[in-house]
Amino acid sequence: MPASYVMRPARPEDFPALMALAELSGPGFTSLPVDEAILKMRLEQSERAFHGRQRNLQYGKYLMMMDHVPDGRVAGCSAVKAGTGIDQPFFNYRIITLAQASHAAGNLRFDMDALVLTNEYVGYTEVGTLFLRPEHRGGGAGRLAAQSRYLLMAAAPERFSDKVLAELRGVVDDEGISPFWECLGRHFFRMDFAEADRLSAISDNQFIMDLMPRYPIYVDLLPPEAREVIGRCHAEGVGAYKLLQWEGFEFDRTVDIFDGGPLVAVQRRHIRTIRESRIVTVETGDSEGDAGARFGLLSTNRMPDFRVCTGKFLASGEDRIVAGADYLDALKLKPGSQARVWMRGA
């Protein structure tokens, strides 16, 4: 069976396809703004990153596109930012628990949660921008888009942090209304959610530093509709959240300052795909028809021509696998090449 999808580095000529994905992504998807200048800049930044031309490795912003091999169209994208908070602050709300007690009130004691503005994830690598066209969701495409980011880190670990985070889009309706924003952020920014979201994508975030409250915000003082969405992700992000948890990411009691969506984090060495992947020599053969073949991901494990595809591969000893010739063609590899493989149940 031919390779259906391939992840590869984004190129400047991907702009029309990337703009189409941005238009489909909807409100609150900050990393895919419908903005020509920003998207073109991100394509240029990604090309520099893959070729190692940025002035500092921590500034690398890697964007990958998913090609649907049968028709050659772009089906989705995902990205890795080598270091957050390096070129601009990365603000979030941390949820802290305050113990309230009074002996004078009959030894009354209870806990209250509060939100505190923080900028504590400086230098973390961030995975994000995972988006697929609706007709390509399911069937393993989402897993490819997600796991390819970790195989990228494994290919060049010196370019990425030892700590990795992911932000998930919070609850935002089809009209672009965020309950969390309407009940909290609007009071301090005096603008719509969409405008604040746009500003965060195109500016250095100085406006957040200027306008956000400096003091803890007691969660119990917020209306129920805001409290209920703190730490919840958008309905379309549930699948991505489950994949992150499968990899080992955990909710870090930190949420987005605009929509209240969750932030999850993990040590890079604990990421499941990285732990379970290995370097192998690839041989060609009929891997699909063998009963011992298993589903997996195969990557070139090299820069700048990093590529990943999914398929069924057959282990041939500890350090060799058999893959169909079409998979090698999709990755632009030759028989006998070294590659990195992750196999389900390995």
Image (spheres, grey):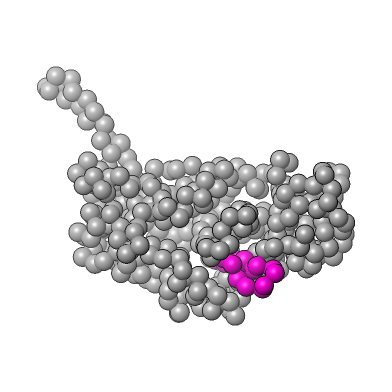
Q: Quadrant of residue 298?
A: bottom right
The residue under the point 28% across, 45% down is 227
- Vertical placement of residue 295 versus 9, above or below: above
Residue 196: image location, x then y, percent: 31, 66
Q: Quadrant of residue 344?
A: top right
The residue under the point 24% across, 28% down is 110
Q: Which quadrant would the N terminus be assigned to in this image?
A: bottom right
Residue 147: image location, x then y, percent: 62, 53
The residue under the point 45% across, 79% down is 37
* Visible residue check, residue 53: no
- Residues in magenta? 61-81
Residue 167: image location, x then y, percent: 45, 54
Residue found at the very far top of the displayed protein: 106
Left-right relation of 288 to 141: right
Q: Is residue 66 located in the magenta-colored stretch of the structure?
A: yes
* Visible residue check, residue 181: yes
Q: Is residue 301 located in the magenta-colored stretch of the structure?
A: no
Left-right relation of 287 to 156: right
